[in-house]
Amino acid sequence: MKFPGKRKSKNYFPVSERGRDPFQEAGGGAPVYMVGIDQLLVDIEAKVDEELLKSLGIAKGQSMLVDDATVDRIYQALKGQGKVVGEFAGGSVGNTLHNYSVIADDQSFLLGTITRQITVGDYAFHYVRNTSSRVNLTHLHPTTGPMGRAICFITSDGERSFGVSRGIMDDFPEASVSEELIAGASGLVLTAYLLRDERTPIFKATLRAIAYANRHAVPVVISLGTAALVREKRAFLIELIRSLTVGMVAGNLDELHELTGQEDPLLAGSAALEWADLVLLTRDRHGLYLSAWVEEALARETKDPILSKSIAEYNKYEYSRAMTRRHCQKPVKVFSHINPYLGGPSVIRNTNGAGDSALAAVLHDLSANIHHRRVAPTSPKHKAQFLTYSSIHQVCKYANRVSYEVLRRNSPRLVQGLPEREDSLEEAAYWEA
């Protein structure tokens, strides 16, 4: 399959060396890019025991707001004990856009607030330094004050818990949201964290961005954050997702459980489809699930073994390309599941950023579809208003592979594009199986 997307080097999937189309060079036309809004953060990762979490009053696996002075005190103590293992540019949307730009080798735009005066070695400096040059930062809003910081406490079982210091991360004004920028985007990427506090400027800015996206039928992608946040804002989030012209939801099983009330991943994905057009659900060592809609007449049956779990023959039409529900006369739910690539890394240092990287792969496929529709509108691939360029089964494979690359490193962000598919005999055998 010829997968459009600009790359300077060979990529794992799903491209071949022959016939690649760069986003911005083939056929000209409007640029293809993603836009995201984020609370700009620097992630400080530290290995701790569960007793420290209890002493700080932080529930394991959850996120808690902590004042600036307390974060400074904790950071200095952990640093002195040699427990800090990494300091990275962070934030869910920031991670997603960085990884999107790395695997697509193309541009994205990040909106948010950053320190006006940046000096060598400070938190803002590290954020810019650790973000891909393909991520356009010119729309960031500069203001006075410290960057947001998130101390990521990693316990011995690999679970992540967060103590977050706001700094200036919520001070993004709605006047800084450009309708022109969003109108031309392939998608608007958000996180539920932006909607936690209705009194903050970034909450109002996010609602304005959503209004612009709806006005121009730009897909809105919402990452759910944490289970506790979804529990707190459940009714609000459901109503928001329902209101989207094109809506996609991404989260882990705990978050989708809180949103839908379903504990089973397939049933949770199916329930979320009642409000959304596409659902990405990650489940740690059990892999990931993709749930979508397709027109009944365009559903394509899988050539792989048909499987049954909580939904009988759930993967029967996983070779279908996703569509928005409003473009289906007879909409049918389709599902795909994939186990971790090669069983997952032999050693997982931590899971920070794995879900964000999987979402980046899905966004790349969405952008590729828009690009291809612009340069080849008469192609049979566009006989209907498809949402993805590839089948949901193929998108699962791609998301799984990108997630693997993050899991095997001690960083939520990719440093470079994915390796060639033929990097090892083990990988080659996997894809031939």
Image (spheres, rainbow, N blue to C red):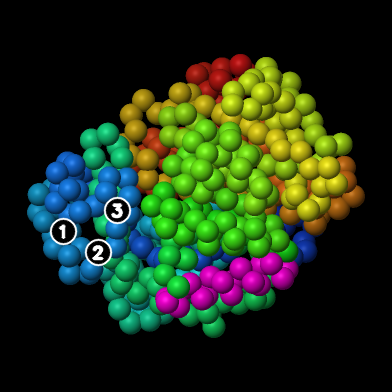
| Label 2 to label 1: alpha-carbon separation | 10 Å
Image quadrant occupied by the C terminus: top right
Residue 418 in view (yes/no): no
Which type of secondary structure does the marked residue at label 2 adopt? loop
Side of 17 relative to 378 (left or right): left
Label 2: how many Cα within 10 Å (few below 14, some 14–19, many 20+): some
Image quadrant occupied by the N terminus: top right
Q: Residue 224 location in percent, x, y?
A: 48, 53
Q: Which residue is mark 2?
A: 66
Up/down of 142 relative to 416, above or below: below
Which type of secondary structure does the marked residue at label 1 adopt? helix
| Residues tagged 3 and 2 counted as in contact (Cβ below 8 A) | no
| Residues tagged 2 and 1 counted as in contact (Cβ below 8 A) | yes
Q: Which residues are magenta?
A: 199-216
Q: Residue 323 location in percent, x, y?
A: 75, 46
Front one among 383 and 257: 257
The answer to if 412 sits in the magenta stretch is no
| Label 1 to label 3: alpha-carbon separation | 12 Å
Amino acid type for the residue under numbered disc 1: Ile
Which circle marks residue 367 in the picture? none
Residue 274 in view (yes/no): yes
Write down the quadrant of residue 70 in the picture: bottom left
Dot placed on the residue nearer the N-terminal end, 3 or 2? 2
Q: Which residue is mark 3?
A: 162
| Label 3 to label 2: alpha-carbon separation | 9 Å
Name the residue located 10 percent from the left edge and 49 percent from the top edge. 81
Which type of secondary structure does the marked residue at label 3 adopt? strand
Q: Which residue is mark 1?
A: 74
Side of 428 relative to 382 (left or right): left
Name the residue located 11 percent from the left edge and 56 percent from the top edge. 77
